[in-house]
Amino acid sequence: MTSSVKTVHVDLAERGYDILIGEGLIARAGELIRPLMKTGRDRVFVVADETVFGIHAETLRKGLQTGDLCFHSTLVPSGEKSKSFSQLDDVLSDLIEHGAERDDLILAFGGGVVGDLTGLAAGLLKRGARFVQMPTTLLAQVDSSVGGKTAINSRAGKNMVGLFHQPVLVLADLDMLATLPVRERFAGLAEIAKYALIDDPNFFDFLETSAAALAEGNKAALAEAVRVSCASKARIVAIDETEQAERALLNLGHTFGHALERANDYRSSLLHGEGVAAGMAMALRYSVQLGVCPGQDAVRAERLLNALGLATRIRDLGGGPYKPDELLAHMAHDKKARNGKLTLILARGIGQAYIHRDADLTPLKQFLVSEAGATGIQMKPLGYT
Ligand code: NAD
Ligand code: GLY
């Protein structure tokens, strides 16, 4: 191990837990997890993304041995389609068939898909088992592994079926990021930029000066970005665990982004983080249109996202088509819509996100028409061919 391990605590009283951030954590997984095991147990249940398991199973096996732990593995096909009722059934059935009990520890080993699915499975297993998040994507390390939102998708939409179920430990091992495809790294950088845009202009400055290093995968820059992002999320979750108010700010860019993802039928041609990046740029431009945000702040945000390898205009996104009427319909069916009015997360400037309630659909539709048909010179983001 070449660097120190940083710890961020999520302060939720008896449900509080640590996020460990550093190198070599999976290689020490057993030693780190052993104190959480119930007396007499030496087997954990790993639910893993099959791609991740194919690359890192040996590191995990040896890592668990450092705490004299053995494991049963349940493999999940990679990709968003695994956040489904049928996959949840497969995971739960496999866990139960192999003897998982409420006192056992379930380990989620993969990105946000496996983290969301495993957290839900753990929450449902025999009325609730404890679980550990071992996030292997940048996005999962800075966002989905922290805060206890678990979910699958249903015919009614994305993340419509889920539980708040907090993990008991998060191991964000920076070594895992070495094998992550570059496009997935960029997608994770979108969620990192989100924390800066919400309420942290100093972090925004750091991201601007470190953008090239972050886009190239520089470990020191990523370590700092993961630490600040986890601290930011931990702070917001501790204030508002079940999203009665402040936690909604973490959805900056998500109502636009989820509509883009849904219009693309959740295909891998538009990753979640890519939808969020474009969605955040749209949220800032819409804030400018409403007259609440200075135009130069929206331009600065867009430049940062582009420098982090992310597209910010609909015409530059993979997948599609993204039709304004369809996007509006998806936004209107969002979890946050009520009586034909929407709650949007907008911004008064960089680091000044706010909850904008009762947004009218008519000006929003005009905005979406202008966005979907927008023309002009746009820097082609990194990572797109
Ligand atoms: P993902 O889990 O699909 O992983 C992305 C891809 O990277 C997959 O193909 C996977 O096989 C591969 N991969 C993962 N780790 C790897 C590694 N170390 N090396 C090589 N390949 C690796 O996607 P994601 O971006 O991590 O997560 C997206 C999901 O997270 C979405 O479903 C989204 O809704 C959810 N999410 C949840 C929350 C929350 O609070 N619960 C927050 C944000 C996003
Ligand atoms: N990603 C949004 C949340 O965790 O609340």
Image (cartoon, helix red, strand yellow):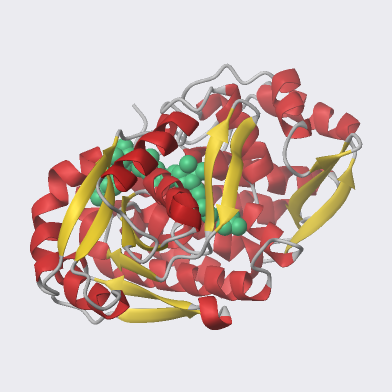
Q: Which quadrant of the structure image shows residue 187? A: top left
Which quarter shows the C terminus? Answer: top left
- Reply above or below: 27 against 89: below
Image side of residue 131 versus residue 190, left or right: left
Q: Which quadrant of the structure image shows residue 86? A: top left
Q: Measuring from the top left, give residue 293's x and y in whole percent.
A: 78, 55
- Residue at (45% x, 25% y) in the render: 267
- Residue at (54% x, 44% y) in the render: 277
Q: Is residue 123 visible?
A: no
In the image shown, does 286 or 28 lie closer to the viewer? 28
Task: Give the image quadrant in which the ligand numbered 2 is located.
Answer: bottom right
Image side of residue 80 versus residue 235, left or right: left
Image side of residue 47 versus residue 126, left or right: left
- Residue at (33% x, 51% y) in the render: 137
Q: Measuring from the top left, give residue 350's x and y in whole percent.
A: 66, 62
Q: Measuring from the top left, give residue 311's x and y in whole percent.
A: 50, 37
